[in-house]
Image: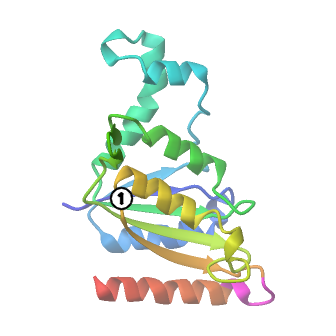
Amino acid sequence: MKKTLLITSSPRGEASLSSRVALDIARRIGGELTVKELWKSPLPQIGPEFVQAVFTPSDFRSEQQQALVEPSDQAVRELLDTDTLIIGAAMINFSLPAALKTWIDYVSRAGVTFRYTENGPVGLVTGKKAILVLATGGVYSEPPMKEFDHLEPVLRTQLGFLGITDVETIWIQGTMLGPGAEERSLDQANERVEALFAAA
C-alpha cells in the first residue's frame, strides 16, 4: 500500500489554504496517510542539550537524552517510511513558518538522512516524491517579486540535500490582491492539481 506523509505548518490553522489543498491532494492519492499538523503540535525548538544528545551514540545516551532525540527519530522514521511527502506551507516574511523549519532540522540527521563523503554530502532519503503546496498573499513565483521568494527555493534545496529531487509545486498565490483574489488563487491551484494527477 502506498504511504503518504502530509506536513501542514501554516499558522492560520484550520483557515489555511495551503493545508486545505494539501489535504485534498493527500486524500486523492489514497493509501495510508500520516498527518503531522505542525501548526497545532510544533516540535520543541532545538537547543544545546538536543544537539549533544543527537551526536551521542544511541547506546551511550542517558534516558533524558533519548527522550530529547525520540521526536527526531520518529520524524525520521515517518519520512523514510513514506512514498510521497506533501508539505503545505504559507510564506511568512518571505520564508518558511518556524514550525516547518524546526521539522526540517529534526529530519536532517548526519549518518541517517544524509552522509558526508569525500565528494560532498549525499542524501539518503531517495526514491520518494514530494509535493509542495505554497500559499502567498502576493505573487512570488515570477518577477518582480521572485527574488523575495525564500520559501520554495529553501524547501527544494533542503529536500534535495536529503535526496528528494522529484518535487512538484502547487502555488496558491496572490490571495490578498483585491476582491475575489482568494477564489481565483484556489481555482488556479486546483487546475494545477488536476494537471498533476492527469499526468501521473
The magenta segment: 177-182
Q: Secondary structure at mark 1?
A: loop
Whether residue 172 can be seen here:
yes
Question: Which is more toward the observer, 49 or 14?
Answer: 49
Image label count = 1
- Residue highlighted by disc 1: 164
Q: Is residue 40 visible?
A: no
Q: On the rendered structure, is 19 left or right of 27?
A: right
Image coords of residue 199 (percent x, y): 30, 87
Q: Is 97 in front, or is 21?
A: 97
Residue furthest left as drawn: 1
Q: Residue at x 32, y 71 (%)?
A: 29
Graded by Cα atoms within 10 Å as few (under 14), some (14 to 19) or many (20 or more), the crowding at tag 1 reads many
Across and down, in percent, residue 81 comes to 27, 48
Please tell me in which quadrant of the rendered image residue 31 appears. bottom left
Is 61 above or below relative to 94? above
Main secondary structure of the magenta stretch = loop
| Residue type (three-letter) at the residue carrying disc 1 | Ile
Asked if residue 193 is positioned above or below residue 21 in the image, the reply reads below
- Give the quadrant of the N terminus: bottom left
Identity of the residue drawn at 23% across and 62% down: 2
Residue drawn at x 65%, y 79% as measured from the top left: 173
Asked where in the image residue 144 lies, by quadrant, the reply is bottom right
Q: Is residue 119 above or below residue 170?
A: above
Horizontal and vertical percent position of residue 74: 38, 36
Query: Magenta stretch containing residue 181, yes or no?
Result: yes
Q: Residue lying at the far right in this picture: please name it.
A: 178
